[in-house]
Image (cartoon, rainbow, N blue to C red):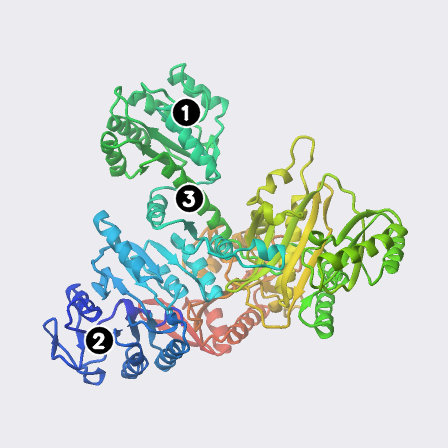
Amino acid sequence: MSIRNLDYLFKPRSIALIGASRDAGSVGDVLARNLLRAGFDGPVMPVNPHHSSIQGVLAYPDVASLPLTPDLAVIATPAQLVPELVEQVGARGTRAAIVISAGFAELDSDEGRRLRQRVLDAARPHLLRIVGPNTVGVLAPRYALNASFAHLAPQRGHLAFVTQSGAIVTSVIDWAVPRGIGFSYLVSLGGMVDVDFGDMLDYLANDEDTRAILLHIEGIEQARKFMSAARAAARMKPVIVVKAGRHPGSAKAAASHSGALAGADDVYDAAFRRAGILRVDDLTELFAAVETLADLKSSAGRRLGILSNGGGIGVMAADALLAAGGELAELSKPCREALDAVLPATWSHGNPVDIVGDATPDRYAAALRALLDHPQDMDGLLVLNCPTAIAAPVDCAAAVTTELARTDVRIPVLTSWVGGATANAGRELLNSHGLATYDTPTEATAAFMQLYDYRLGQELLMQTPPSIPEAFSVDRDLARSVIREHLARVGTGWLEPTAVYRLLTAYGITIVETRDVSSGAEAAAAAESLGVPVALKVRSPDITHKSDVGGVMLGLENAAAVSTAAEQMLARLRREAGGARIDGFTVQPMVLRPHAHELLLGMTSDAQFGPVLVFGQGGTAVEVVHDRALGLPPLNLHLAMDMITRTEVFRRLRGYRDRPAADLDGIAMTLVRIAQLIVDLPEIRTLDINPLLADSDGVLALDARIFVSAEAPVALAIRPYPRELEATLTADDGRTFFLRPILPEDEPMLRESFAKLSTQEVRERFLVPMRTLSHITAARFTQLDFDREMALVLTEPGPPGRRDIYGVARLSADPDLERAEFAIIVRHDAAGLGLGKQLLQRLIDYARGRGLEVLWGITLRENTRMRTLARRLGFSEAPMADDSTLTRLTLEL
């Protein structure tokens, strides 16, 4: 349902408390006190059959007796009564309920699950939204709503905090009240029978009173809904998350390298990163990150400059920075010369910049000015101070604030005044000037890395991968036939090696030629055909890691050696892998690339997020080394390269000493091809390429395994590019154009096409004059979440980003996927040829196919061409009440 009727939850005009109580200290008693004492401007109607009043307010014996229909019902009764109560308030017209009661699915019993379903069934006909069950409640300080049994009332502020746990809500309130931290909303989702994190993200993203969204997540059930909502919210305001359960007590056994490496917490990490969410470790970091992001511009890189009056704390900061994955900035010669001119000869002559313990406020200001004059040397600057008898910390802080006020600061500046009572006055001064200040250098460097991580997340957020991100051809029909043949003949299980070879080559993935054989004699013959030396490997559905049991023999120089090796391998496997089914062997030519890196590329299926891609160092010790990065398909080259750079092996792939760099583009393209394979063939559950050899000459897969299943898969967490919408349109003059969904690569051509529009065309499309389309705006138009938005571009056939765009038809749905706004423009040099009608009709067909109910748009009344076109396609027209120059076009679908 998403945000439908959530206003009744957070902005009710009237409330019924069902289960209100006079028993001191009971949940019903605390709820009544909180609701009635919060200052709520509306009737609060207690429901209790045994009392005529609660907290001095008239009570009612049942729902039927209520004098008016409540917008919000708060239910705190035994669980068995809840379904009937939900039905009663829903039938009266109530549109939101908070179910405080426990005793549902959290008990992990059949009865609890039945009760949960009965609650849903009772609410659904009335479109009644439910928070809970088993929740501490909902607080909206802005609207004086405290529908909770929290022990304290939070202050009003601009942070929204959402969690599944009631205990976390009350702990956060307890922590925040003495610190003066306020909230727009605090929500305990509890059992999430209806309202979940996706709904809350959608609602809070558009809430003007909320400047940042804080999440405490235990688990996510609807991954695609969450990802769509998170990506939309993170584009508008910071979204910061703490994920509970980072270290599970037991490890899941996996039948593949990819499965073994893709732990559930790592998958959440990858999802948060893709959604543009900043992840932190605990609640303290959560609130610190809010202040950091509010006070500082994001960091473009990991290079930090450090300015200190003490060598020890400078080194501490450097250690903390490097441990967190940051880099010490390297000062350029002009920067060092500028520092030489203002510092004593005993300064450190490098980074950290130690200006010596006798530093005066003037020396601080001069050194700070010299560093800020060279912003290209660093991505951020940390200013440290430790107390000395030479200069008071508060005076040094004053010098810093004064210098920053008169300097054009182009990088984030963080501060840490170390110490206790002596440092407090300096910290207070820095805080009063809006500077980000931290108690310790470690906290400051952690904040700097959060800025960097947030920037990376925002960049990844703008990437919406296409179906074929870069030009490469695939043989989908061949690939699908391989899967169908296996499922028809064998069913669920591991593909034969030759089938794996056919499947990967169909997607342009280079893999060493593979022959399946059933005996030693056939293996010898295959070796002669392929050319020696060869590798011999056992073929068995029961042996996951062949080398662990002696199922691999390399460098066999002739046919006789191959035959002998096969016999020896069989004997060894009977001893060491007794009971394993042996189907035969595979024979492959030996590949001699002594300087190649061994990599792992693969995918596994996560119960929540569906297919997950894995990249990292490969070889037989892959689980021991544990060097990997995860990502969600689909990918493009940018996203694939991000996965690669997040591994330790990336440093070696760039080349070192006399070893040239590996073909990074080739590795990234292989990841892209694997991602596309997974998108196209949902029957694939597990895929391992290990090792993938990579050197300066390219990439080559030596061994690969693929597990397929006919069972319904977990859906992709991110909806991929809808290739089925591609089409060829013919204009009235006979010219043909290519119609397809927009791609991120279209951004430069969209800006170029915008520049070709006339002033009138721009005004008719955007309703206001615009001279240029900015990079940020164009990026937002081209990088879509296809689960909620669609933009079809009219262009010429060819690579995206290299062909003119002649028209765009855009649709943006509300989070409920019921109504969508549309807009359309056809460039003047393609207008009047029937293309606008075809574009809009395609958009209408798409909207109907997605189940949308209403398509609407706003245009200028003077735009007669658009109004005429819309009427021909069935749109109704109505003038805008608040602006006589505009008209609203509406189509009931």
Where is residue 471? Give x, y as percent: 67, 55
For disc 3, the marked residue is 450
Q: Amino acid at mark 2?
A: Gly
Residue at the (55%, 67%) spot, across then down: 715
Where is residue 251? Give x, y as percent: 52, 56
For the residue labelled by badge 2, is the local secondary structure a helix, a strand or a loop?
A: loop
Of the two numbered discs 3 and 2 in the rendering, the one whose residue sits closer to the viewer: 2
Mark 3 vs 2: CB contact within 8 A: no
Quadrant hosting residue 239: bottom left
Q: CA distance from mark 1 to mark 3?
A: 23 Å
Q: Is residue 394 visible?
A: yes
For disc 2, the marked residue is 19
Q: Which residue is farthest top? A: 345
Residue at the (68%, 41%) spot, across then down: 662
Q: Which mark is residue 353?
A: 1
Q: How many marks?
A: 3
For the residue labelled by badge 3, is the local secondary structure a helix, a strand or a loop?
A: helix
Residue at the (65%, 48%) spot, across then down: 618
Where is residue 84? Give x, y as percent: 30, 83
Q: Quadrant of the N terminus?
A: bottom left
Q: Amino acid at mark 3?
A: Gln
Q: CA distance from mark 3 to mark 2?
A: 45 Å
For the residue labelled by badge 1, is the local secondary structure a helix, a strand or a loop?
A: strand
Of the two numbered discs 2 and 1 in the rendering, the one whose residue sits closer to the viewer: 2
